[in-house]
Image: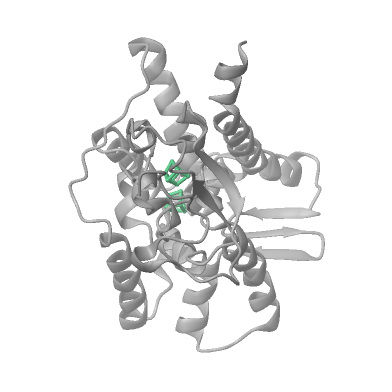
Amino acid sequence: MSKESSRATYYNRLRLLSLTMAFCLLLLVPILNKYLHISFIQGWFQSLSIGHLWFVSPLEGMESILTSKKLYGPLLIGMAWPVLLASLLGRVYCSWICPISFLSDILDRCLGLFTRKRFRRQHSPLPKKTLWYALLGEIILTLVIGTPIFVFLSPPGLVGREIMMITLFHTVAIEGLIVIAVVLLHLVSQRFFCRYLCPLGALLGIIGAKRRLAISTDMGKCIECGTCKKVCPLGLDPIKQECFSAYCWNCGKCVDSCKVSALMFKWRDISLPEYPGGQTNQTTPHPNT
Ligand code: SF4
Ligand code: SF4
């Protein structure tokens, strides 16, 4: 493989490996629990315990606090891990771990086998900020009906729950249809649910808005070919600094796609001021500006 093509797939391969490992974990846990009677590890990404460590999805944890009106120490500690991860690295749960991302990527790859080109449905039927309204609506609904809705109906959570149901009880829950609907929506408009509707993705985006790791753009090298925007699964334009926005989930696809290496992951120096217009200190301006 040439140096150029291996550079062009580096983050894509790493991300697929991470997504695959995370999905395998979902498959493995109920098998360990049921057939080997190993209970050291239990649950799925909504609530996962490994020994004495407990990881809780921040949205599901927040819903539990809102509906029970109680603060529970272990729950707060369990929520702190993903919050820390998102505040340092952004929405990487979405792009590197979430089973919905895994299923969407696998679907794209399968379709790519038949069409010889990766499916890209980049039309954006809704404004990006719909994502924030989805989170707001979900919180309001939870408060009004007094039930943690996302705990029961979150598509990423449902994948883990369905796998658990199949392995332990040899049955599926009707809510699993939501996962199928989300994946089918992805065929209509790329990552439709993640772009516009996922309250968890929105919450992680808000937590990671000032993340330390972000895509840096070197406008001195950029030839403005637009490839990075074309490959972005969220329809963001790195050249317009949208890779610094709360929407970006640091997948690295734009970095892989740039033939002149104008994009790269960089730790942001949060002590330096931001430029007007949302540009950060990590943007190297175009030589002609
Ligand atoms: S936006 Fe939601 S469904 Fe999509 S990858 Fe993130 S957590 Fe998973
Ligand atoms: S801007 Fe780049 S890193 Fe961010 S979501 Fe788009 S392709 Fe991924």
Observer-nearest of 133 and 163: 133
**Picture coordinates of residue 289, whole percent (x, y):** 35, 49
Q: Is residue 9 above or below residue 249?
A: above
* Residue occupying image coordinates x 62% and y 17%: 3
In the rendering, at what x and y percent does residue 284 appear? 48, 50
Residue sitting nearer the eye, 208 or 268: 268
89 and 81: which is toward the camera:
89
Residue 255: percent from left, percent from top: 50, 36
The part of the image, by quadrant, that contains residue 14 is top right
At a point 47% along the width and 65% down the height, the residue shown is 209
Residue 287 appears left or right of 126 = right
- Measured from the top left, where is residue 218 in percent x and y? 48, 44
Q: Quadrant of residue 200?
A: bottom left
Q: Is residue 176 above or below residue 5?
A: below
Counting labels gives 0
Q: Quadrant of residue 71?
A: bottom right
Q: Is residue 167 left or right of residue 50?
A: left
- The extreme left residue here reads 125
Which residue, as the protein is rendered here, is positioned at the far front?
288
Q: Residue at x 30, y 45 (%)?
A: 192
Q: Quadrant of the N terminus?
A: top right
